[in-house]
Structure formats: structure tokens, C-alpha cells
Image (spheres, rainbow, N blue to C red):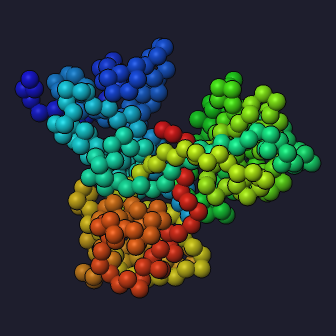
């Protein structure tokens, strides 16, 4: 029996035990001490990035906002990563989850994020809120022995650790920017330093690249590999492959277009694992201005956006792209391509307009302009190596 309407508000440390109870009923039971979880949650509370829905004093739903950047067209764009979304079993199907997520969207915009992304537990729920598939987290498996034989022994390699966090971030920017990559998360130095400090994390660096990997049962798992040259890529992959006498397989989180697929004399195992993530455009003008655009492309076209959840985004716009820079500005009522919130997210992530039109999230405009609009966001397949 629920006597009053559940209320949305910021979480406080005094709410953590209540949230843990909801979490344990939504995911697997939390193992070990909850102190680490509470310490992390406190940081989100301090940044106004942890919201809950309350029935009286009891938390019945909660979600947190990660302060991320995400690479789009080779440039970093601020992105609100939504995670830890939980709803108590007795409040599911009552609109509590939607109320929570609408609060999360509003808070993310308030904090200045032009984009949001998440790994969906329920695709229909997030589609109603304007999210659409943006890319995937791809895990491929390779024979360790084949990696060992890639060569690169003439490339100097050294062991890395927490003190190399800033260098790792420099290497990421050096490679991903010119490569016009999309989808990858951008981290700050502290979490990278903490990652490299873990005993189970192995890091090796070359002058223009690094690899971070560890054991995965009896196999090895590459969490991230960045290389600025073919020789360095071969050296880093073969460093992991040197474990062939113990591990028969290396699982790696890499792009489906990673050069490793072209370097090996054998193919990856057929059953690649893909976890798809969803994207949401929160501020269209800021999202367009922040990302990278093809340097040789020039366009000036009208767009119409229909965003039921964020009415401020709706209306007529004009998209201008030139010299690798994009701008989206308000315009007079001029009929152009019409994008629902899902269509806008899909187009931003590089989904062809032909697919968006067939799905009913894009319409109108001149079909002869579709090629230019596709070229504007086309690029390497958007991907992540991180799960959050």
C-alpha cells in the first residue's frame, strides 16, 4: 500500500543502506564489505550525480551519473554515463523508473553534459526516453601462439605502473584524435592511476603505445591496447602472446576495425561477444560543436528535431559543417530532415539515414541530402572497451 506519491531527490550518505537493499534485489547480492561501494557513492553525491526516488524515507529507485568524456570524430565530448539504475521490485511497473530517468536527464543537462550513454537493461524503456543504439563493446578471442609470433622485438618495451597514468592518457589522445575514433571513453588521471595500481593489472609501454591486460581464468584478457605504429602494435600484442605456454587464448576488447584483424595470419574465433550501448543527445547545439567532423566536408542544411522528453531541443535548426567544425543554430521554420530524439542519437553515432527512415525515427527533407548527412557522421565503428 503506497499512501503518497514517490519523490525524486538527491541521495545522501544516510540513504546508502536503503539503496544497497534495492541494489541487492536488482542485481546479484553485494559480496564483501560495502565500505568501498559507499566511498564511491559519496563522490557521486558530492558532485550532485546520484539521484533517488523515495517512498517516504525509503529509497525505492536510484541511479548515478558518471562524469565522462567520449570520443566522437576524434574529439572529446563531455558525456553523462548512466549506471547503477535500480528499482525496488514492489515499485516496478508504476512509472518510478521513468520518473527517476527523467530526473537523471534533467540533472545531466543541468551539469552541462551534451551527451549521455548507458548499457541498457531494458531497451524499450530507454528508447521511450530518447536513447538509441550508438555502438558496441566488442570482445574478440585470438590464439595466444599466433600473437606471440607477430614480432616487434626491436621495439623497446618497459613495464608501466601508476606513475604512468598521465603518459597513458597522452598516448590515447595522440592516437584517437588523428584516427577520428568514436565512442571510446575519456578518463581523468585518478581512475587511470588507480587502475594501473591494481596487482592484477599488467601494463607495458612503448614510446608510442601501451597495453593493459591481466588473467581471465586460465586465459589472458586485454583491457586496452593503443599503438601509434604498426611495429609498436606488433610488439605489444606479442608481449601478451609471450604467455602462450600457459594461456591458449587471449580475449581482447578492441574495435572490429582494429589492425590486429589484418595482422594475424589466422582469424579471431567466430563467436565474438558484443554488448551494445545506447546514446542520447541532451544538448544538440553543444553536441554538434564539440565533436569532430570530416575535414573535407562542407554542408549547410535545415534540420527539425522532435524531442518529447526535452522540449527545449525541439524545433527548427540549421546544421553547418566546414573545415572540420560543426555548428547547429536555431532557424526560422524551414522544412528539412525531421529527426526524433532516437533518430538524432542514431545519426550522431553514424547510423545511415536509410536505416533511420525505415525505423520511423527520421523523415522528411530531401533524400538527395542524405548522402551528405551520412558522410558527416560516418567513420570508424563507435566502440567502447569499458563497462560502467
Q: Residue at x 51, y 39 (%)?
A: 387
Give percent across and percent down for residue 216: 65, 29
In which quadrant is the N terminus drawn?
Answer: top left
Q: Nearer the viewer, residue 89 or 83?
A: 89
Residue 65: give x, y in percent of width and height: 40, 40
* Residue 118 vertical placement versus 215 (above, below): below
Q: Is residue 367 above or below residue 214?
A: below
Left or right of residue 301, residue 59 in this image: left
Q: Is residue 197 visible?
A: no
Residue 22 x/y as whole percent: 30, 24
- Residue at left 74%, top 41%? 143
Give the residue at x 21% y 33%: 92
Q: In front: 125, or 108?
A: 125
Image quadrant assignment for residue 273: top right
Where 119 falls versus 219 (above or below)? below
Q: Quadrant of residue 13?
A: top left
- Taking the spot 39% from the left edge, 34% from the top edge, the residue there is 84
Of all residues, the one furthest to the top in this rendering is 33
Residue 40 position within the rendered picture, expressed as x and y whole percent measured from the top left: 47, 27
Extreme-right residue of the structure: 154
- The foreground one among 55 and 148 is 148
Amino acid at each position: 500500500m503506497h499512501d503518497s506519491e514517490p519523490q525524486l531527490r538527491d541521495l545522501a550518505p544516510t540513504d546508502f543502506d536503503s539503496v544497497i537493499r534495492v541494489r541487492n534485489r536488482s542485481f546479484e547480492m553485494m559480496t564483501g564489505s560495502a565500505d568501498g561501494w559507499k566511498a564511491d557513492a559519496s563522490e557521486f553525491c558530492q558532485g550532485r550525480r546520484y539521484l533517488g526516488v523515495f517512498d517516504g524515507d525509503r529509497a525505492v529507485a536510484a541511479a548515478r551519473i558518471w562524469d565522462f568524456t567520449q570520443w566522437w570524430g576524434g574529439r572529446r565530448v563531455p558525456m553523462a554515463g548512466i549506471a547503477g539504475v535500480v528499482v525496488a521490485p514492489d515499485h516496478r511497473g508504476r512509472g518510478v523508473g521513468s520518473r527517476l530517468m527523467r530526473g537523471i536527464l534533467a540533472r545531466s543537462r543541468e551539469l552541462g553534459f551534451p551527451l549521455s550513454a548507458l548499457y541498457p537493461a531494458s531497451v524499450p524503456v530507454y528508447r521511450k526516453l530518447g536513447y538509441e543504439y550508438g555502438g558496441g563493446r566488442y570482445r574478440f578471442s585470438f590464439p595466444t601462439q599466433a600473437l606471440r609470433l607477430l614480432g616487434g622485438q626491436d621495439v623497446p618495451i618497459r613495464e608501466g605502473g601508476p606513475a604512468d597514468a598521465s603518459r597513458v592518457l597522452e598516448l590515447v589522445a595522440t592516437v584517437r584524435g588523428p584516427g577520428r575514433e568514436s565512442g571510446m571513453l575519456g578518463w581523468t588521471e585518478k581512475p587511470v592511476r588507480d587502475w594501473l595500481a591494481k596487482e592484477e593489472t599488467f601494463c607495458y609501454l612503448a614510446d608510442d603505445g601501451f597495453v593493459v591486460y591481466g588473467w581471465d581464468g586460465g586465459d589472458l584478457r586485454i583491457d586496452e591496447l593503443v599503438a601509434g605504429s604498426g611495429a609498436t602494435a606488433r610488439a605489444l600484442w606479442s608481449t601478451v602472446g609471450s604467455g602462450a605456454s600457459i594461456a591458449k587464448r587471449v580475449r581482447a576488447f578492441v574495435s572490429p576495425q582494429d589492425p590486429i584483424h589484418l595482422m594475424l595470419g589466422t582469424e579471431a574465433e567466430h563467436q565474438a561477444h558484443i554488448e551494445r550501448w545506447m546514446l542520447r543527445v541532451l544538448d544538440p547545439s553543444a553536441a554538434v560543436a564539440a565533436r569532430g567532423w570530416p575535414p573535407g566536408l562542407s554542408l549547410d542544411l535545415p534540420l527539425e528535431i522532435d524531442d518529447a522528453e526535452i522540449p527545449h531541443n525541439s524545433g527548427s535548426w540549421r546544421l553547418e559543417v566546414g573545415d572540420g567544425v560543426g555548428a547547429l543554430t536555431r532557424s526560422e521554420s524551414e522544412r528539412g530532415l525531421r529527426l526524433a530524439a532516437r533518430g538524432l542519437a542514431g545519426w550522431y553515432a553514424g547510423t545511415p539515414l536509410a536505416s533511420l527512415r525505415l525505423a520511423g525515427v527520421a523523415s522528411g527533407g530531401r533524400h538527395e541530402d542524405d548522402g551528405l548527412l551520412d558522410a558527416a557522421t560516418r567513420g570508424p565503428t563507435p566502440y567502447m572497451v569499458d563497462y560502467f
